[in-house]
Image: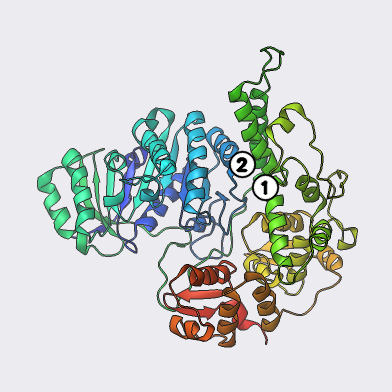
Amino acid sequence: MSSEVALLPEAYLEEDVAVLGRKGGGKTYTSKGIVERLLEGKRRVLILDPLGVWAGLRTAANGRDAGFPIAIFGGVHGDLPLEPAAAVPMADVIARNNIPAVLDISDLSKTAQQSFLLAFLRELRRVNTEALTLVLEEADVFAPQNPMGDDSKALHAEIDWICRRGRFRGFRLITITQRPARLSKDVLTQAATLIMHRLPAPQDRDAVKAWVDGNGDRDQAKEVFDTLARLDVGEAWVWSTTDNQLQRMRFPKIKTLDTSATPKAGEKRVEPKTLAQVDLGPIKTAMDAAAAERLQRAEPKSGGKNGSAIDPAALKAAEDHGYARGLADGGVRSARAVFDALLSYMAQPQTYEEVTRNLLTDLPSDVKMLYGKGGYGRGFSALDLAKDTANPMPADLPRSPPQAPSKPKPAASGELDGAAMKLLAAVCRYDGITWDNTCIVAGILPGNGYFYKAKKALVEGGYVRQAEGLVTHSAAGRNANGGTGSPATLREIVSLWTAKVGAPGDQMLQFIANHRGHQVTTEQMSAAIGTKPGNGYWYKGVKSIRKANLIDQDKGSFRLSAFLCEASR
């Protein structure tokens, strides 16, 4: 039986869909095509992305033009970072507005993913009332057949509720997995349409049989099961209970950049260079409004002996908003800024007094103020918000008077923080450079709160311009930096990062840099630095330099990143 290129009937998109198939078989590609149709129809879409492969929706397939203006929270390409404090207000905003969004949780640990999504989904299903398609990439991560641990079981319960009872709250699911055997049967059996790409593992085909037993015709199933292990890439069986149709088919090419394709040997993963612009103003305003509404609902209730007893639910809501307000005003980000600054001081031994003095010099004024208010960077505490009283600042830190927000001025005014000045100095050394490479030159990890705040200050202050995936300096930026400068040398960048990443990442980076653009094997690097591969110490080193985009890794070999290979000695 041959397969033809075809579109899914529109009626299928109104029901739950499960897309199955081993890695590299085309399941994410197929799912992106479905999501593109939903976005073209102005439908409400939310994608939970633990792989960091959905940012390509913002870029056209040619890699040059813009794609869909879908908001991205978290990850390398995130418009805003994902913070625990943002989970509830973010869910409120998405539930109450048509804001198509990607939640890129790929940079979070498994524990952090579960914690964030548990709070997010609880609020989302409580507030959402209109049609919303929820896309679960690697769905077995969120709803495994055998969840382990309290958080995993609680998250599984949320997904299960949305899957089985969420219809009346507007939820539709697109469930994507390469291991149907590991996906909760309660989730899989709720799908009205099954899209089955190549499934070579017998246990995964058995999981499909369970769906067929409940929904399909066993006589029709024979041909499906006989061919599932041998389907070509991009080919799939589509079986739907909506109209009781079974078809072997292929799907049209997607219109946006395919960032989920598996790189071949020697290739780099495709990254979007031009992202469709998203107006974050309404999103931030809506998040602020959601937080304010929660605060209003959390006002202390009168009563009790002294007439001032606080309702526990209200106190909890106030604390939730406290975290959100801490995020909005820089509380959580300030803690990261402090942490990143401390890391930069570790290259040379310093006394406590020297560290404190450096912190108060390098950190922006709003971070210094929050560092000494309500929990050292945690943000505003629940009682701060409820009673509007300020906690005293630590005795060993001088007070910093509150400063009214103002327009950024040249560096001499001291209003750009240390991270922003480092990024600006890096940008000014090039005619055009990506943000990732700017971070390499500046010695700043991409994607954390420290980076996002600095980037925002430079963009909104007019110090830099962004176009076609590149950032360039403006006249204001050159003035603030005191000029431009020559591109950074490889020796300069390697020296900067070896002082930051610590052992054994520093030795690994130096060894790889010595080989410039040539690949080095795990065995070669292990022998050179005297560390056995495969243990936690080894992976810590590799992770530290990969996270900073300093190297490329292909299975058992390593190579200096393309940007560093082009740098002069």
Front position in the image: 227 or 33: 227
Residue 366: x percent and y percent?
80, 48
Front position in the image: 400 or 85: 400
Using the image, tell me which numbered label, if any, was put on residue 403: none
**Is residue 473 at all visible to an observer of this figure?**
no
- Asked if disc 2 and disc 1 are in contact, CB closer than 8 Å, the reply is yes
Front position in the image: 477 or 201: 201
Residue 486: x percent and y percent?
77, 80
Tell me, what colour scheme is on the image?
rainbow
* Secondary structure state at the residue bearing disc 2: helix
Tell me the CA gap for discs 2 and 1. Answer: 8 Å
> Eyeballing the image, is 256 above or below 389?
below
Image side of residue 393 versus residue 551, left or right: right
Front position in the image: 528 or 52: 528
Image side of residue 528 versus residue 286, left or right: left
At 39% across and 27% down in the image, what residue appears? 168
Residue 113: x percent and y percent?
49, 48
Q: Which residue in the rendered view is the most extreme toward the left?
A: 219
| Quadrant (top left/top right/bottom left/bottom right) for the C terminus | bottom right
The quarter of the picture where residue 66 lies is: bottom right
Image side of residue 155 versus residue 290, left or right: left
Which residue is labeled 1 in the image? Answer: 332
> Eyeballing the image, is 100 above or below 442?
above
Using the image, tell me which numbered label, if any, was put on residue 85: 2
- Amino acid type indicated by mark 2: Ala
> Eyeballing the image, is 522 above or below 379?
below
